[in-house]
Amino acid sequence: MKKSLLFLLIAFAGMMLSAQVTDTVVSKVPSNKNVILEEYTGVGCGYCPIAHQLGNQLMAAHPNRFFAINIHTGGYATQFQTSFGAALANQTGLDGYPAGTLNRHVFSGSTTDDSYTSWTAHTNLLLAQPSPVNMAAFGTLDYAARKLTLTVQLYYTANSAVSTNMLNVAIIQDNVLGPQTDYGNYNPDQWVGSQYNHMHMLRHLITGQWGATIESTTAGTFVEKTYTYNIPAQFGINGQKVDAILDDLSFICFVAEGHQEILTGVEAEITRVNQPANNARLISVTDNKKGGCNDLASADLAVKNNGSAPVKTLSVKYKVGGGAYETFTWEGNIEPGETGTVTMPGFPVTVNTAQTVYAFLTTVNGEDVVSQEVSGKVTKYYFKTWGPMMFKLTTDRYASQTSFKIFDSDGNVVLEDGGFQNLSSNGTTVHEYPFQPAEAGCYFLEVYDTGGDGINAGYGSGSFKLYRQDGITLWFSNNGKFGSMARYAINAMNPTDVENHSQEMNVYPSPVSSTLYVESSQPVLRADIYNLQGQLVRTVKGDVHSVSVSDLSAGIYTLKLATEQGVTVKKIVKQ
């Protein structure tokens, strides 16, 4: 009987130990540090969007290893402040904005303030360093009760350099729309119409200004702490309240040596419960740069499904500028947790003029909803042209990021080029292309920049324009501040106008084998040769008297000779 009782006690203890191991999520295998960026910012800081973009890039480059916390504090922060920001900033030694610390580490001197120009290199250094402690954080966010239950586990794989550590739990909010000074369109992807989409914003520290005390920090120590927190309707101080949208909240946990060196950090894995079935949110309205040679524009709506059921139908109310509201219904599928694109039907606009489109959701899956109105800028660029044209593209220092193409309404490309050669320093390079559609119709010009900041963002004042080859008419110009792409619809009404002017022009010999000679009563400023596919194969500029064609393949070509009086077109045969 005693043996049986002893056996049961041993078995019960084994079950308890097994349950404890099962509940231990944190790894016991030594690992390197993760990085916490505490970025100090404010809506009045015109260069801060540079740092915002860099923080986003580092998060994308190091998923689950790099975490950003944007702290609005200081003279530039007239909104979005917290009661914690000033003390956090004061211990960094920062002396200007943009500013930030990486794991509150001192890389040089005696302060943790680290220039954003060094963030990439310093991040790589920290990620390669071993951490004495591993972390795991997980919990639930109850939508019905607006209640967070969060468990944080620590396991020390080595002794901490100090005997007491501090555990910090920060509430972060994304998609907070508001103002932002931006001196150079440094972060175009975060603009939503006339408002800036603030991300990774510190809203609260559940564990207080400097965290909760961890008193045992020796190798082999396991620590588990559980927190419950009721999410208020709004966050903020001093009349700067912002709605606390549960869908946009995340929770960053990190361990620090007192107020300084951060050893590692993680984002908590949160299970969201009691979410409404039909809970979608309109995030942004962006110009999709679609439409033909008319006054119709369109826009894309980014819709996040925060509900537990797929979104199958939406009703959207919208207006353009100060016009009347219209309604359209969308059908499709957006799975729970996913963000989908809803393309609006074409709507009339004033062409070549930026206009604001306002939109909000009225029903989701047939159920009435109350949603925030979101706005975005839309510009339909549309011009009517005639005659042969010249496209002039001025690229900036990073010309390899730039390209363009001109194509017809069927998608057939008639002219394209790029990327180009980068310069060794800031500056510009001019590229010119004669362009004459084969026939009247609707054509499109698209200019691309893979860097996402256009060709006029401080590395040289790039631009582009389209004008008539005779220089009489400028159809349009663009200052190069277009983000990732600019699109123009071109209605070529009479492509051959102003050609074949009555001027004495003699081209010989024909057929030609090596050199083509030009005699003209007016100085020839430019000669362009096109093949039968409409591709430009040779250009000679200046006072043109001859053109070498020895390397061209045999066949029929079009020769265009430009003078101050206009353009003359000749057919030549290369033998």
Image (cartoon, rainbow, N blue to C red):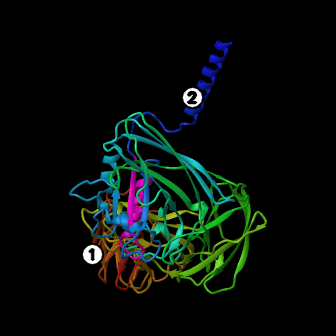
Query: What mark, if any, has residue 136 been given in the picture?
Result: none
In the image, the segment drawn in magenta is 34-59
Residue 493 in view: yes
Three-letter residue code for mark 1 = Gly
Q: Nearer the viewer, residue 247 or 255?
A: 255
Q: Quadrant of the C terminus?
A: bottom left
Q: Is residue 442 above or below residue 403?
A: below
Q: Give the image location of residue 245, x and y in percent.
A: 60, 65
The residue at the far front in this view is 2
Q: How many marks?
A: 2
Q: In the figure, residue 111 lies in which quadrant?
A: bottom left
Residue 38 counted in the magenta span = yes
Q: Give the image location of residue 407, x and y in percent.
A: 52, 66
Mark 1 sits on what residue? 542
Q: Nearer the viewer, residue 470 or 212?
A: 212
Left or right, 319 with respect to 426, comes to right
Determine the residue positioned at 47% across, 63% down: 202
